[in-house]
Image (cartoon, rainbow, N blue to C red):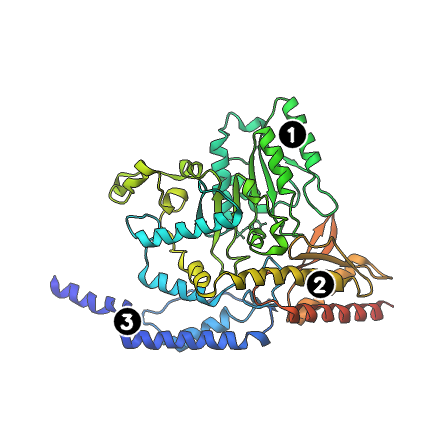
Amino acid sequence: MRERIQKLEQSARRLDPGEEERDALLSAASDYAREFLRGLPGKKTYVRDDSRRGLDSRFDEAGLPIDSVLAEYRREVDTTGILPASGGQMGYIPGGGLFPSALGDFLADISNRYSGVSFASPGAAEMESALVRWMCGVAGYPESAAGDLASGGSLATLSALVTARDHHGITHRVIPDACIYLTAQAHHCVDGALHVAGLGAVRRRVVPMDAAYRMDTIALQGMLEADLQQGLKPWLVVASAGTTDTGAVDPVDAVADICARFGLWFHLDAAYGGFFRLCDEARERLSAMGRADSIVMDPHKGLGLPYGCGAVLVRDGPLLARSFTYYADYMQDAISRERVTTGHYSPADLSPELTRPFRGPRMWFPLKLFGLAPFRAALSEKIWLARYFHREIARIEGFVAGPAPDLSIVTFRYCPARGNEEEANHQLLQAVHDDGRVFITSTRINGRFTLRLAVLNFRTHLEQIDYLLELLREASRNLQSTNG
Ligand SMILES: *Cc1c(COP(=O)(O)O)cnc(C)c1O
């Protein structure tokens, strides 16, 4: 039997390469990363690929050398589609990919520390709690707040709405009369979260917006009064601090007043815009954030982290724990004894996840290494770039800019002197996509095909904005001459 085990061991040990091989692997991966980043400024942000057949799903019994694995990775993954690392990515809410985050992930993966429970790794759990406390401070929350580092804004929203549901006792008996209030610009992850939380059947009231796509709070109040008069049960308002489509910030203070008066849960979706509270340009607009009962903000958006990091924050922290703290006998050694006596919770007590990646280092390393100043500057810069684009696009013949940006998203349309407007905007977008150096998207606002610029990536600077303006100027000129 021992012989048999030893034979297996020989082959199994392949999973744990020795130092020399590790160094070679590391240096190959590091070379790859160096080459990728060096070539980034010259790379297209968007490369369309209609010819894919799917990656080979066979894996050989014997492994392959790192060079051929990296070559396949480069060829199959790292060449087509949208390049989120690029400063030219100004379409979907841009993500990040800070270099020290990669180092943080690397080190977290090497030790594979488990951050969910204090007992398992007190320092890892404490790091995540400290990051949450820091974000609570950014949001303007009091000491009593708590939160969780989730995989992204969608899961963070689920945690927030489940907490709201439990606190307001929205059970199956109440659901037919339960009403929630949001605008047509609320992110679709709210619908997803309601569905997963068993709240798909609540009455959704779509609150009108003003000309800048912000929630009309007078209308909100009228709708609440009407629903109450009918004997219905309003319990939740979802506002946005930066909508995905137009970047509009709903009037947070006025929404908070109404929620306080009517006894409603106020959820603020700040997945895109929350971190702008770090910079002077947006601080006033976001000053009332701390009045929301729950907030979602995405470090993998405004803070420049790689994908896989959103945060839920709850002003009255123990409510989050009430919804997510469970007990199982097989966890008896790990469940923190302090939790019972001091109310000091581990990350897993505040989250639907048990085993999870150690998400702290990817945020902690860049914050420690760079300090806060460059983050504040980058966020201010994004706001000014959006304002600059908003001014400049209106100066190009035929273009009409949407509302002045609340944060860093600008909507705009091309209104040609002749020909079909919708068709012309389609063609302009196609021209930008064909060029590929920068990437923007379109949306529909009030049924109208609209172009949209979202500035957030930490690598986006004046040069990409100027390039886009030039591209649009040229493409619109070409359109005019072919249509004229
Ligand atoms: C991105 C976004 C979300 C969803 O967050 P994910 O991290 O993509 O899951 C929710 N709300 C707003 C306003 C967003 O921009």
Q: Name the foreground residue: 191 vs 326.
A: 326
Identify the image quadrant of the N terminus: bottom left
Mark 2 nearby-residue class (10 Å; few <14, some 14–19, many ≥20): many
Mark 3 nearby-residue class (10 Å; few <14, some 14–19, many ≥20): few
- Disc 1, SS: helix
Residue kind at label 3, given as amino acid type: Pro
Question: Are the two marked residues, 3 and 2, in contact with CB atoms closer than 8 angstroms?
Answer: no
Q: Name the foreground residue: 54 vs 392.
A: 392
Residue with the mark numbered 2: 389
217 lies above or below 456: above
- Disc 3, SS: loop
Query: Which mark identifies residue 17?
Result: 3
Q: Earlier in the sequence, mark 1 or mark 3?
A: 3
467 lies above or below 201: below
> Is residue 268 visible in this depiction of the protein?
yes
Determine the residue positioned at 35% across, 69% down: 60
Determine the residue positioned at 51% across, 70% down: 78
User: Is residue 428 found left or right of 202 in the rendered image?
Assistant: right
The label nearer to you, 1 versus 3, is 1
Q: Name the foreground residue: 54 vs 460.
A: 460
Residue kind at label 1, given as amino acid type: Leu
Q: Determine which quarter of the picture holds residue 451.
A: bottom right
Residue kind at label 2, given as amino acid type: Phe
Residue with the mark numbered 1: 224
* Mark pair 3, 2: CA separation: 52 Å
Determine the residue positioned at 54% across, 77% down: 39
Q: Earlier in the sequence, mark 1 or mark 2?
A: 1
Query: Which mark identifies residue 138?
Result: none
